[in-house]
Image: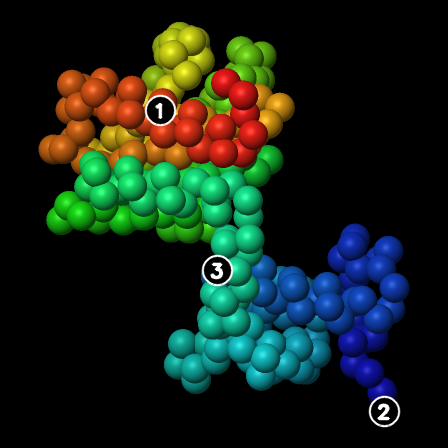
Amino acid sequence: MWDDTRMTSKPSTAEAGAAPGSQTLLRGLAILEAVAGGARDLAALSASLGTTRSTTHRLAAALVEQRYLTFAPRDGYALGPKLLELGFRAQQAAPVTRVARPHLERLSAECGDTIHLGVLEGDWALYLDKLPGRRRIEISSRVGERQPVWSTGLGKALILDLGEARWRGFHRLGAARGGHSPDLETWLARMRTYAARGIAYDREENEPEVRCVAGPIRDAGGAIVAAFSVTSTVQYMNEARMEALAETVRAIADAISRDLGWAG
């Protein structure tokens, strides 16, 4: 039978160098990325992949059958429960997540605020874990999303050791919703202070009315491999409380780092 995957679709750069048997896998992964990016129907998926509708439908149907996608006639395609299962397993398998979780759970119980854990992925802060707080507020972050480094406390904590030359490259990279966006020189001055103290703040730079205190997590070699933040609204996070939390955050960061082999 004629395989219509060989019709006029143009292979991606990755597909062009891939063995023929792996092209279907790469296209399946591309469909997942497209759906994660907002594509919902065959037309959008076909345009994203550069494949015919019949090829796209066959690949999408296989992903639905294996629960990597779901499909509803009116809503179209969405990410499926299998990805949630795999994501949870990957999260639990990540050493820093596994080691940090007990410490962050105790901190969450003590302070009642939302706790985030994340790593530097390229030029972005990637959120690996989130412990919702007990307060009657909603922090809009999600596990698996990427946030700007320059505007988030967690992001700033991740780059404390990189130095000023590297810091400049992060400034204003990515959009933030906050209304307190410092100019470069002000931001660099704050970063110097954060690096000297081993702690970082978000003073409504990333999101209006939201503040956080963040600390870096180090591995056995002393390199920053992750960071976590304590996040709340201005109502519960005035300047005095941020300063009070700084010592707690630093102590928890050091404890997690020691569990990862850091000598201090």
Marks 3 and 1 sit apart, C-alpha to C-alpha, by 27 Å
* Residue linked to disc 3: 88
Query: Quarter of the image containing the N terminus?
Result: bottom right
Give the label, 2 or 1, closer to the camera. Answer: 1
Could you tell whether 20 is left or right of 88 in the image? Answer: right
Marks 2 and 3 sit apart, C-alpha to C-alpha, by 40 Å
Label 2 packing within 10 angstroms: few (<14), some (14-19), many (20+): few
The residue located at (52%, 60%) in the rendering is 89
Could you tell whether 179 is left or right of 158 in the image? Answer: left
Give the label, 3 or 1, closer to the camera. Answer: 1
| Cβ atoms under marks 3 and 1 closer than 8 Å | no
Give the label, 2 or 3, closer to the camera. Answer: 3
The residue located at (43%, 25%) in the rendering is 254
Quarter of image, res 48: bottom right
| Cβ atoms under marks 2 and 1 closer than 8 Å | no
Could you tell whether 203 is left or right of 70 in the image? Answer: left
Label 1 packing within 10 angstroms: few (<14), some (14-19), many (20+): few
Marks 2 and 1 sit apart, C-alpha to C-alpha, by 65 Å
Give the secondary structure at mark 3: helix
* Residue linked to disc 2: 1
Quarter of image, res 121: top right
